[in-house]
Image (cartoon, rainbow, N blue to C red):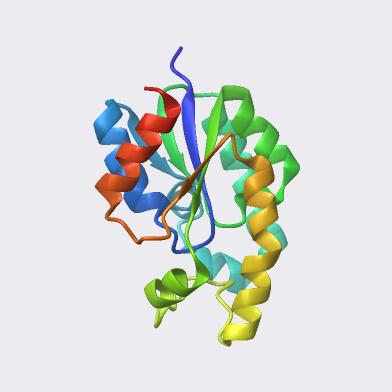
Amino acid sequence: MTENIILCGFMGCGKTTVGRVLASLLGMEFADLDSVIESRADMTVSEIFTSFGEEYFRALEAQAAAELSKRSGIVLATGGGAVLDAGNVALFKSGGRIVFIDVPLETISGRLEGDASRPLLPTDRAALRRLYDARQPLYRAAADIVVSNAADAPAPDVAREIVKKLGA
């Protein structure tokens, strides 16, 4: 059984982009938790939040996390809030290692500018800072490995750094 690699971090840190490259480098399957949820619900994450609220979305997220955690040999890009649930973290750790992609808020805010697809993206910088600061300790606590991308390196460089830290 090949262990899973679970990528966590703030929205816009590059989990999906890096995850695709990482999966290719390692010859593993790639899965994006939000995409799985969207496919099953036949709605975007934003539509789910708007129609049913965050609590309903988090329930769908926990269900998808439980199912994906039973599989092996996948690189899984989580949503920015997936590790807020200790149950999700336990499931992820049961089948693999969690990698936190740590990117400075200034870089993330530049990447997210004008992105209307993220339902929890605050519109003002102070609220974004509060959300970022509140989540950073949770990502660190969940992570088995932390990869810093303070230099805003391209996804292949970040993926290679993850491979190195995994010892793969």
Judge whether 70 appears above or below 59 on screen: above
Q: Position of residue 87 (x, y in %)?
A: 73, 38
Judge whether 3 appears above or below 16 on screen: above
Residue at the outermost bottom position: 124
> Looking at the image, which residue is at 50% across and 37% down?
6
> So how many labels did they put on this image?
0
Q: Is residue 66 left or right of residue 3?
A: right
Q: Is residue 128 visible?
A: yes
Residue at the outermost top position: 1
**Camera-side residue of 40 and 150:** 150
Image quadrant containing the C terminus: top left
Q: Position of residue 116 (x, y in %)?
A: 44, 78
Residue at the outermost front position: 151
Q: Is residue 53 visible?
A: no
> Looking at the image, which residue is at 45% across and 69% down?
108
**Camera-side residue of 19 and 71:** 19
Q: Position of residue 73 (x, y in %)?
A: 41, 23
Q: Position of residue 37 (x, y in %)?
A: 50, 50
> Looking at the image, which residue is at 70% across and 64% down?
134
> Looking at the image, which residue is at 52% across and 33% down?
68
Q: Is residue 163 left or right of residue 9?
A: left
**Camera-side residue of 129 and 87:** 129
